[in-house]
Amino acid sequence: RKRYTGLIETYRDRLPVADDTRLISLGEGNTPLIQLQNIPRLIGKDVDIYVKFEGLNPTGSFKDRGMTMAVTKAVEEGSQAIICASTGNTSASAAAYAVRAGIKAFVLIPEGKIALGKLAQTLMYGAKIIQINGNFDQGMALVKEIVDHAPVSIVNSINPFRLEGQKTAAFEIIDELGTAPDYHCLPVGNAGNISAYWKGYKEYSTDIGSLKAVTNKRPVMCGYQAAGAAPFIAREMIDHPETVATAIRIGRPQSWDLAWTAQRESEGWFAAMTDEQILAAQKLLSSNEGVFCEPASAASLAGALHDIELGNIPEGSTIVCTLTGNGIKDPDIAIKQCKDAHPVTIEADLDAVKKAILDSL
Ligand code: F0G
């Protein structure tokens, strides 16, 4: 069996790389598409729900798909440094791929609003961390300006190579299911990912030059935002986004137009989930399926369950939910979620262990 060496190598004919391009890769992509077994039974609905567990990428989020392409191209163009604004995952990913490439990474993050694991990763990869007294949207605005004043390449999703890399998740789903799902649900923050998936689904369902369409089917795209950070539901940019799901604490999405195009062309929709719904979905998934995603990721499942309940997604449907990041990234939220599950402390002897087990059976 051939060694897996990352998504650029796998989908090279559909990505903008030359034969002699030096690929900056950590073996990203090829993430599991896990069929939920217990939750459909629990909700009593006849639906096939799959989760695309992007938390199993090298730095624990879907950002690695975009970053392998963005950093590969930055290096090809001779960049010595990259920069991004981030709610945490992009910064971790940028930091890892930069060190892999041997270039510098600068990351702008909102002070105090980054999940602990993401901060730890970014520190360990050795990026230059610049904390701002402001939110992601302010950081993003600064990053767009700074490129005129310093020799750095932006690796946020406004860099088109990011979406090129991220579109491969749609390819993987079609390659695995043999066709597109009926519905594709995902969390929406800066709106790059929903735009990338839609690009991928369109490209795999269209003849492009010598590349023949792989399927004639496209999914309905369903984008879910946190209720306190929901510009797509307000239909306008918002200034003070707030949510427990810090990854999607964004009020001014950069891929605004692309995401609306995905919604319109796929005849999909956007909806808002409350923090309570998001946290409930995160817990439901971990405690019933053994899949632990971060809060923002759970917005996709929360939304899917909500729209199944309302009948917006009919029974008999095949649904894919993207789980964008690993639950381990945000240990504070996880421990808060389980504050009633007190671990027992006992003497280190056999009888005490036996009693602890028999008492709980
Ligand atoms: N889920 C997670 C875990 C994320 O980190 C992000 C975005 C999203 C969903 C939303 O994806 O922005 O493409 O709509 N995180 C960015 C970051 C903003 O800086 O890590 P999107």
Image (cartoon, rainbow, N blue to C red):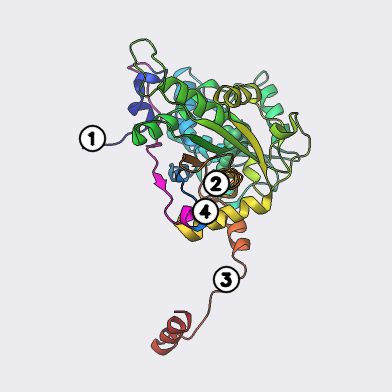
For label 3, being within 8 Å of ligand 1 is answered no
Q: Quadrant of the C terminus?
A: bottom left
Q: Amino acid at mark 4?
A: Ile
Q: Is residue 17 magenta?
A: no
Q: Position of residue 280 (x, y in %)?
A: 60, 56
Determine crowd level at label 3: few under 14, some 14-19, many 20+ residues with C-alpha closer than 10 A: few
CA–CA distance in space, label 3 to label 1 = 44 Å
For label 2, being within 8 Å of ligand 1 is answered no
Secondary structure beneath disc 1? loop
CA–CA distance in space, label 3 to label 2 = 23 Å
Q: Which residues are magenta?
A: 18-41
Front one among 51 and 15: 51
- The numbered mark, 1 or 2, whose residue comes first in the sequence reads 1
- What residue did someone put label 4 on? 328
The answer to whether marks 4 and 1 mark residues whose Cβ atoms lie closer than 8 Å is no
- What residue did someone put label 3 on? 341
- What residue did someone put label 2 on? 301
- What residue did someone put label 1 on? 2
Secondary structure beneath disc 2? helix
| Residue 16 horizontal side relative to residue 222, left or right | left
* Dot label at residue 157: none
Nearer the observer, disc 1 or disc 2? 2
Determine crowd level at label 4: few under 14, some 14-19, many 20+ residues with C-alpha closer than 10 A: some
Front one among 54 and 39: 39
